[in-house]
Amino acid sequence: MNVPRTPSSSFRITTHRVPARVRLASGTTLTGQFSCAEQARQHVGSETLSDLLNDAARFVPFFAEGRDDPVLLGKHAIRTVELLEPDGVAPVEAFGEERAIEVLLDDGTELLGSIHVAAPIGHTRTLDFLNETGRFVRVRRSDGVVLVNVAVVVVVADAG
Protein backbone atom coordinates (compact mmCIF):
# COMPACT_ATOMS: atom_id res chain seq x y z
CA MET A 1 0.00 0.00 0.00
CA ASN A 2 1.50 3.30 -1.07
CA VAL A 3 0.24 5.95 1.34
CA PRO A 4 1.55 9.47 0.84
CA ARG A 5 3.57 10.72 3.78
CA THR A 6 2.32 13.81 5.51
CA PRO A 7 4.47 15.89 7.80
CA SER A 8 3.92 14.90 11.42
CA SER A 9 3.12 18.53 12.21
CA SER A 10 -0.19 18.16 10.39
CA PHE A 11 -1.33 15.87 13.20
CA ARG A 12 -0.29 18.19 15.99
CA ILE A 13 -2.65 20.46 17.81
CA THR A 14 -1.55 24.08 18.01
CA THR A 15 -1.49 25.19 21.62
CA HIS A 16 -0.81 28.21 23.77
CA ARG A 17 0.61 28.18 27.28
CA VAL A 18 -1.34 29.36 30.32
CA PRO A 19 0.83 30.28 33.35
CA ALA A 20 -0.62 28.99 36.62
CA ARG A 21 0.07 28.09 40.24
CA VAL A 22 -1.31 24.69 41.24
CA ARG A 23 -2.08 23.56 44.81
CA LEU A 24 -2.18 19.79 45.15
CA ALA A 25 -3.89 17.60 47.75
CA SER A 26 -0.45 16.74 49.16
CA GLY A 27 0.08 20.41 50.06
CA THR A 28 2.64 20.87 47.29
CA THR A 29 2.42 24.04 45.21
CA LEU A 30 3.71 23.99 41.62
CA THR A 31 4.23 26.97 39.35
CA GLY A 32 4.40 26.48 35.60
CA GLN A 33 2.21 26.30 32.52
CA PHE A 34 -0.65 24.30 31.07
CA SER A 35 -1.02 23.88 27.29
CA CYS A 36 -4.46 24.78 25.95
CA ALA A 37 -5.55 24.19 22.34
CA GLU A 38 -5.85 27.18 20.04
CA GLN A 39 -9.26 25.83 18.99
CA ALA A 40 -11.66 24.54 21.64
CA ARG A 41 -13.71 21.40 21.00
CA GLN A 42 -16.91 22.63 22.66
CA HIS A 43 -17.12 26.26 21.54
CA VAL A 44 -15.73 28.86 19.18
CA GLY A 45 -12.35 30.26 20.17
CA SER A 46 -9.39 29.03 22.15
CA GLU A 47 -9.64 26.33 24.79
CA THR A 48 -9.63 27.83 28.29
CA LEU A 49 -8.04 26.26 31.32
CA SER A 50 -11.58 25.54 32.56
CA ASP A 51 -12.22 23.53 29.38
CA LEU A 52 -8.99 21.57 29.84
CA LEU A 53 -9.54 20.76 33.51
CA ASN A 54 -13.21 19.86 33.03
CA ASP A 55 -12.76 17.47 30.11
CA ALA A 56 -13.02 13.70 30.64
CA ALA A 57 -9.27 13.01 30.87
CA ARG A 58 -8.08 12.02 34.35
CA PHE A 59 -4.58 13.45 33.97
CA VAL A 60 -3.30 16.69 32.48
CA PRO A 61 0.25 17.63 31.41
CA PHE A 62 1.83 20.50 33.32
CA PHE A 63 5.12 22.20 32.47
CA ALA A 64 6.52 22.85 35.96
CA GLU A 65 9.23 25.46 36.41
CA GLY A 66 12.68 23.92 36.53
CA ARG A 67 11.77 20.83 34.48
CA ASP A 68 12.38 20.19 30.79
CA ASP A 69 9.55 17.68 30.33
CA PRO A 70 5.96 17.95 31.51
CA VAL A 71 4.68 16.15 34.57
CA LEU A 72 1.24 14.55 34.55
CA LEU A 73 -1.10 15.81 37.25
CA GLY A 74 -4.04 13.73 38.43
CA LYS A 75 -7.03 16.06 38.22
CA HIS A 76 -8.53 14.47 41.34
CA ALA A 77 -5.46 15.64 43.32
CA ILE A 78 -5.56 19.26 42.12
CA ARG A 79 -7.17 21.44 44.79
CA THR A 80 -6.94 24.86 43.16
CA VAL A 81 -5.36 26.47 40.10
CA GLU A 82 -4.57 30.16 40.23
CA LEU A 83 -4.22 31.77 36.81
CA LEU A 84 -1.11 33.96 36.71
CA GLU A 85 -2.27 35.63 33.48
CA PRO A 86 -5.73 35.83 31.90
CA ASP A 87 -6.54 32.82 29.72
CA GLY A 88 -9.23 34.64 27.77
CA VAL A 89 -12.87 35.05 28.62
CA ALA A 90 -14.60 31.80 29.41
CA PRO A 91 -17.61 31.44 27.09
CA VAL A 92 -19.99 31.41 30.06
CA GLU A 93 -18.68 34.83 31.13
CA ALA A 94 -19.88 36.39 27.89
CA PHE A 95 -23.45 36.06 29.17
CA GLY A 96 -25.25 34.99 32.31
CA GLU A 97 -25.50 36.44 35.77
CA GLU A 98 -22.57 37.21 38.05
CA ARG A 99 -23.09 35.92 41.57
CA ALA A 100 -20.93 36.89 44.58
CA ILE A 101 -20.01 33.87 46.72
CA GLU A 102 -17.95 32.84 49.74
CA VAL A 103 -16.28 29.43 49.54
CA LEU A 104 -14.80 27.32 52.37
CA LEU A 105 -12.46 24.49 51.36
CA ASP A 106 -11.85 21.34 53.40
CA ASP A 107 -8.43 22.62 54.56
CA GLY A 108 -9.94 25.82 56.01
CA THR A 109 -9.05 28.04 53.04
CA GLU A 110 -11.66 30.74 52.44
CA LEU A 111 -12.24 32.33 49.03
CA LEU A 112 -14.35 35.37 48.28
CA GLY A 113 -15.24 35.96 44.65
CA SER A 114 -17.88 35.56 42.01
CA ILE A 115 -19.13 32.95 39.58
CA HIS A 116 -21.04 33.39 36.35
CA VAL A 117 -24.28 31.45 36.25
CA ALA A 118 -25.67 30.87 32.78
CA ALA A 119 -28.49 28.36 32.88
CA PRO A 120 -32.04 27.83 31.68
CA ILE A 121 -34.79 29.74 33.49
CA GLY A 122 -35.59 28.03 36.75
CA HIS A 123 -32.06 26.64 37.13
CA THR A 124 -30.16 29.81 37.99
CA ARG A 125 -29.62 29.20 41.69
CA THR A 126 -26.06 28.80 42.96
CA LEU A 127 -27.06 25.28 44.03
CA ASP A 128 -28.11 24.37 40.49
CA PHE A 129 -24.89 25.79 39.06
CA LEU A 130 -22.63 23.91 41.48
CA ASN A 131 -24.48 20.62 40.98
CA GLU A 132 -24.30 20.89 37.20
CA THR A 133 -20.77 22.28 36.79
CA GLY A 134 -17.79 20.15 35.88
CA ARG A 135 -14.98 19.04 38.17
CA PHE A 136 -13.65 22.63 38.53
CA VAL A 137 -15.53 25.86 39.10
CA ARG A 138 -14.13 29.18 37.92
CA VAL A 139 -14.10 31.79 40.71
CA ARG A 140 -13.21 35.36 39.79
CA ARG A 141 -11.57 37.22 42.66
CA SER A 142 -10.36 40.82 42.91
CA ASP A 143 -6.79 39.60 42.27
CA GLY A 144 -7.55 37.19 39.42
CA VAL A 145 -9.15 33.86 38.61
CA VAL A 146 -8.95 30.63 40.63
CA LEU A 147 -10.25 27.29 39.44
CA VAL A 148 -11.49 25.27 42.41
CA ASN A 149 -11.96 21.51 42.47
CA VAL A 150 -15.56 21.09 43.66
CA ALA A 151 -14.55 17.90 45.49
CA VAL A 152 -12.70 20.01 48.11
CA VAL A 153 -15.51 22.53 48.61
CA VAL A 154 -17.21 22.24 52.00
CA VAL A 155 -19.44 25.33 52.14
CA VAL A 156 -20.63 27.89 49.57
CA ALA A 157 -22.66 30.91 50.61
CA ASP A 158 -24.10 33.71 48.52
CA ALA A 159 -22.21 36.86 49.48
CA GLY A 160 -24.38 39.46 47.83
Image (cartoon, rainbow, N blue to C red):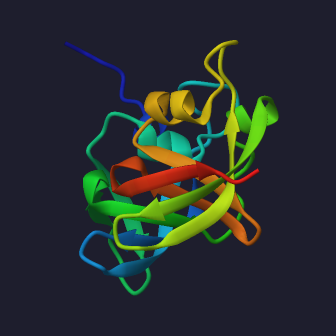
Q: What residue is rendered at 63% in x and 25% in y?
A: 43
Place of residue 156 in the rendered image (x, y in percent of width and height, measured from the top left): 52, 51
Please tell me how many numbered marks the rendered image carries: 0
- Residue 28 x/y as whole percent: 31, 81
Left or right of 141? Residue 156 is left
Task: Tell me the quarter of the picture where residue 87 sits.
Answer: bottom right
Residue 146 drawn at (x, y percent): 58, 61
Q: Nearer the viewer, residue 139 or 64?
A: 139
Q: Is residue 24 above or below residue 75?
A: below
Residue at position x 65%, y 40% in the image: 46
Q: Nearer the viewer, residue 11 or 74?
A: 74
Can residue 63 be seen? Answer: yes
- Taking the spot 69% from the left edge, 26% from the top edge, the residue there is 118
**Residue 48 vertical placement versus 78 (above, below):** above
Name the side, left or right, on which 61 lies relative to 145.
Answer: left
Q: Does residue 108 sit above or below 46 in this rendering?
A: below
The N terminus lies in quadrant: top left
Q: Residue furthest left?
A: 1
**Whether residue 19 is visible:** no
**Closest to the observer, 114 or 104:** 104
Left or right of residue 127, residue 71 in this image: left
Relative to the observer, which residue lies in front, 23 or 16? 23
- State the residue lying farthest toward the bottom: 66
The residue located at (43%, 46%) in the rendering is: 53
Give x and y (percent) for residue 81.
49, 64
